[in-house]
Every structure is written in structure tokens, then in C-alpha cells.
Amino acid sequence: MNDALSISRKVYDLLVANSTSPPPAVRTWTGEMWGPPQAATTMVLQHPGALRAALLPPSDLVAGEAYIYDDIDVEGDIVGLLHFGADLDAVKTSPILVGKLLRLLRHLPSDSRRRDVVRPKLGGRLHSPGRDSRAVRHHYDTGNEFFEQFLDPEMVYSCAYFLDPAEPLGDAQHRKLDLICRKLQLQRGQRLLDVGCGWGALVRHAATHYGVEAVGVTLSPEQAVEAKLRLRHDGLDNRVTIEVRDYREVRGEFDAVASVGMFEHVGRKELDTYFGKLNEVLRPGGVLLNHGITNRSKPARFVRGRPSFVSTYVFPDGELLPVEATIGAAEQAGFETIDVESLRSDYALTLRHWVDNLERHQDQAIKAANEVTYRIWRMYMGGSVAAFERGAISVYQVVFAKSERPWSYGRRWATAADDVG
């Protein structure tokens, strides 16, 4: 045990010496403390083989599993720990340092609490309707009560729109919903399609404040049930319809289409199908707003890599594409690009709110789901904060229109009425 303690300390010291972010403190299985006494994060090593379980073989999937199955615990700021790990560039790029680290880790016990773990897997053809349905249910049918522990009261599960980083999350989410409606230039009596409608916040907002009729589609039965209850409560169920339906199965004609936070599920191979379908259901002159997370850390030619923590436990089959691939596919389908806005900093702040809410409601979240699910989501959202803050990923709202749409001058939703004179 003393050898394991000594080796673990050497591993910690090696990592600290080669990261540019503030290091976490460490508390070992013996109660011994290392590192800065005022550190915002404490990494708890639950047994002598904890660091080996977290770092060998090296991957974010293995590290994430070490946390969710309690080889290690994280007290305090989980985002800070993930920034620390992401900044280990010297270790990642130096064969000498990698070799030294691996030699140390292999001298630790091979104990792990990750026993008999069966990683989630989906069968069927990638991005077929059946497989997409199972992937979405894996993510969203975690339970409405679980999502209530960290979302705002309107249950908006996408990036908010902040004008002041100190303002409440609910205010920023309300502004985002209204901004989408204004970017789509919705008018009373129009028909709106919300693809991936979640719990129905956007269609409720559009029907209430813009007088539209709306259809929301989701692949999650649990979301659909809650969305219908909220519509009935607001007296909107005669003007808004919620359907459990794949976007490829949508029928009808619409003046505007919003796709907010579902584009990540589409997949590169289905881009032509996706934009072709949305073009098909839009009336002449119609408008599409596509809001999706993009990949900024890989070249434009997207290549699916080895399984990651997020792709295994959170977003099976999710694919993040460069924004230029999104715009190119939409233009190829017949759309004209009208407006592009990055909300990267907004999503980092949104996720920080969600992480804080989840941690504050830890007991209720575990009761609504279980301990492993709580840890998966804490790790996933904390890692997403770090990825957005570091610029590895971003999120864009892109407004597309059919080419025959009448000219609209300026960005009226962003321009004050008294900006001249």
C-alpha cells in the first residue's frame, strides 16, 4: 500500500508539472492530502489502483468510467479538473513523458470498481430511423424529473442567450426563444414546425406571443407526454400539436421551421436527406433556423473516431460537424444563407448553470435516476463547459431561406428602433 501511495504521488506530480491549468488537490484512500490547500477541486482516490483505473489505457472514456463507477470522486469544481486534464499537452505530445507515466501506472494495483460493466451499444444501420429513435430515447428518456433538476422552469434544453453573464438562466432562455421567433420573422396565422421540440418550450412561446399554429416533433415519448401536459395547462393544445415522429416522416407545409439542438443527431451521411426534407416541407419563401453544436477541433472532412465517453454514455451516434459543412449542405439543398451567429460563450455559461443546478439538487437527481446517471451527466456537462470555453466546439444559429423569399433589409431583431437620428 505504501508503494502504491508513493507511485500515485509521483503520477500526480508528473501531471501537475506538465499542465498549464491550476492543479486539483488530492485526497488519498489513506486520508493523506496533496496539492494546493485552497484548490477549487479535490480529486479523491478511492483505492490504491484509482489512478491506474482512471488513466490506463489513456482515453476520456476510461477516465470518465473511473469517475462514474467511483474509482475516483470529484469534490468541488469539476470543470476545473477537466480543464487541468485538457491542458496536459506536454504529456500527450511527448513520447518520453508518456512512457514514464505508463511505467508508473503499471506498477499500481490493477484494482478497479468498474467490474462487469456493459457499455451501451446500439444495433442496426447507423442513422436509420429505428436506430436514431433508440439513440434519442437513450438520452432523453432519462426521465423528465431528472431533467427538471437542472433546467429552467420552461425546460429549455439548449443554449441560452445572455446579454449579461449575471442574469438568471430563465431570463436568458426566454430571450433565446424570442430571438428564434424574431429571426424566423413569425407572423400571426403562420405554421411553424419545431424539429426536435423537446418539452415544447419553443412552440408554446411562438403560439402565445406570435399567434402561430405549430407542430413539434420528438423521438422521445417521455418528452411528448410532458409537452402535451404543458400545452393543455396553457390552453394551447388546440393550436399546437406534439408528435412522436422522425423528421424524415414529417408531412404538411410550413411557413417556418426551427431545429434547435437536434442537428447533432443527424449525422454527416444524412445531411442531404435532412436539409432536403426541411426544404420539402417549407412553403415558397419559407425560413429555416438551424441551431446546432459544431466541431472546431477537427478538419472539415469529418471522421468518426474511437468511442468517447460522450458517444458511449450520453449521445450515442452523435456527430459534431464543422459549421461550413452544415452551410454547404443546406445551400446544396436549395437554401440561401441569411444569417450566422455563434453562441459559443453563451453555451459555456448555460452549461455552468446546469452543472451548478445539478450539483445543488444532487439528492433529488439521484432519486429521480440513480448515482451512475448523476455522475454521467455531471461529467458530461462539466466536460462540455471546458470544451466550449477552450474553443474545441461551438454552437451556431444559422438562418436559411428559400431563394424566392422577398428581400428583408437589415437585422431587425438586433437593431434598436431609435438607432437613427
Image (tube, rainbow, N blue to C red):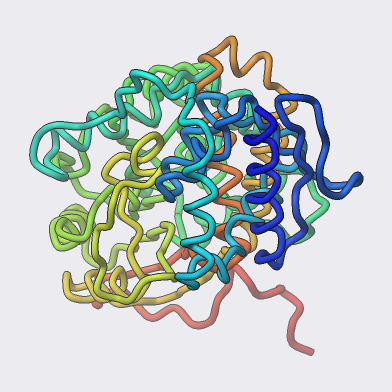
Q: Is residue 208 visible?
A: no
- Give the answer, above or below, for where 64 lies relative to 371: below
Residue 408 location, quadrant: bottom left
Query: Residue 277 at x, y = what percent?
Result: 16, 54
Query: Residue 316 at x, y = what percent?
Result: 30, 39
Q: Residue at x 81, y 32 (%)?
A: 32
Asked if residue 260 lies left or right of residue 153, the reply is left
Asked if residue 342 lies left or right of residue 330, the reply is right
Q: Residue at x 61, y 44 (%)?
A: 382
In front of the other: 334 or 390: 390
Query: Residue 35 at x, y = what percent?
Result: 82, 48
Q: Locate the C terminus by quadrant.
A: bottom right
Q: Locate the N terminus by quadrant.
A: top right
Residue 20 location, quadrant: bottom right
In front of the other: 50 or 381: 50
Query: Residue 271 at x, y = what percent?
Result: 19, 60
Q: For the view shown, which residue lies furthest in the front direction?
A: 3
Q: For the view shown, which residue lies furthest in the right direction?
A: 38
In front of the other: 279 or 45: 45
Q: How many marks?
A: 0
Q: For the view shown, which residue lies furthest in the top direction?
A: 367
- Give the answer, above or below, for where 346 lies relative to 197: below
Q: For the view shown, which residue lies furthest in the left direction?
A: 125
Q: Residue at x 24, y 64 (%)?
A: 303
- Give the answer, above or below, for where 196 lies relative to 111: below
In front of the other: 62 or 222: 62
Residue 227 location, quadrant: top left
Q: Residue at x 32, y 44 (%)?
A: 195
